Image: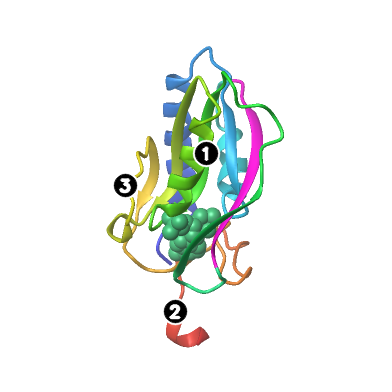
């Protein structure tokens, strides 16, 4: 176990308070990157003290293993128009940065009023492309982690805590 359920709970409240203060009197669209961020999103929205909308995109950069393929594909786009809106991307984890860089550039072409990024986990050491992160839950070492929405080959999303996958055991 890397991050306990209790530590997650406390940190989500802190993030929600900060976001609520920063977006006071605004109604941001929280753009959740499927599938990994849904658990974080659902905890976060219940702690926000402001009005917000949710929308979803699906982006894939992983071929199912523990290393990024380097190829980013958008699988699902927003339902609502982002034009003139305050957008807050909600992502589970940033690793190489390719997924968020792709999504950020894509959304910026659609003239939002503002665009910020909130990530639950930041694997700072493995960054290949710099992406501006506005809210970070936890910085973690360069290990493959699962739980709290994050999977390995679709398994372990249901764990209530963040654990490090023992790569030797599953190969
Ligand atoms: P990036 O494009 O390399 O930054 O990778 C971001 C995406 O890869 C995330 O949205 C996750 O879906 C996935 N990912 C990266 N690291 C991990 C991990 O440790 N566990 C589970 N998924 C991960
Ligand atoms: Mg993801």
The residue labelled by disc 1 is: 106
Q: Magenta-highlighted stretch: main secondary structure?
A: strand
Between marks 3 and 2 in the image, the one whose residue lies nearer the viewer: 3
Rounded to the nearest whole Å, what is the CA distance between mark 2 and mark 1? 35 Å
Between marks 2 and 1 in the image, the one whose residue lies nearer the viewer: 1
Name above or below for residue 154 compared with residue 115: below
Spot the residue most to the top.
25
- Which region shows up in magenta? 51-62
N-terminal-most mark, 3 or 2: 3
The residue lying at 49 percent from left, 15 percent from top is 24
The residue lying at 71 percent from left, 35 percent from top is 79
Name above or below for residue 127 compared with residue 107: below
Q: Is residue 162 visible?
A: no
Residue 54, percent across and down? 65, 33
Residue 36, percent across and down? 58, 55
Q: Label 3 neighbourhood size at 10 Å, few (<14), some (14-19), many (20+)?
A: few
The answer to whether the residue labelled 2 contacts the one labelled 1, judged by CB atoms less than 8 Å apart, is no
Q: Label 2 neighbourhood size at 10 Å, few (<14), some (14-19), many (20+)?
A: few
Between marks 1 and 3 in the image, the one whose residue lies nearer the viewer: 1
Work out whether residue 142 or residue 159 is closer to the camera in this orientation and state it. Answer: 142
The residue labelled by disc 2 is: 166
């Amino acid at each position: 176990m890397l991050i306990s359920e209790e530590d997650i709970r406390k940190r989500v409240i802190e993030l929600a308070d900060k976001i609520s203060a920063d977006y006071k009197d605004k109604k941001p669209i929280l753009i959740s990157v499927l599938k990994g961020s849904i658990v974080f999103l659902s905890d976060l929205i219940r702690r926000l003290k402001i009005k917000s909308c949710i929308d979803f995109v699906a982006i894939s950069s992983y071929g199912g293993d523990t290393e990024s393929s380097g190829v980013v594909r958008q699988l699902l786009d927003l339902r609502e128009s982002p034009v003139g809106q305050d957008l807050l991307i909600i992502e589970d984890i940033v690793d190489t940065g390719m997924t968020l860089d792709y999504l950020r550039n894509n959304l910026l072409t659609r003239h939002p009023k503002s665009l910020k990024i909130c990530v639950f986990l930041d694997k700072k050491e493995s960054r290949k492309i710099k992406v501006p992160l506005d809210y970070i839950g936890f910085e973690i070492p360069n290990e493959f982690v699962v739980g709290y929405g994050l999977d390995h080959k679709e398994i372990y999303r249901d764990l209530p805590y963040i654990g490090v996958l023992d790569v030797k055991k599953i190969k």
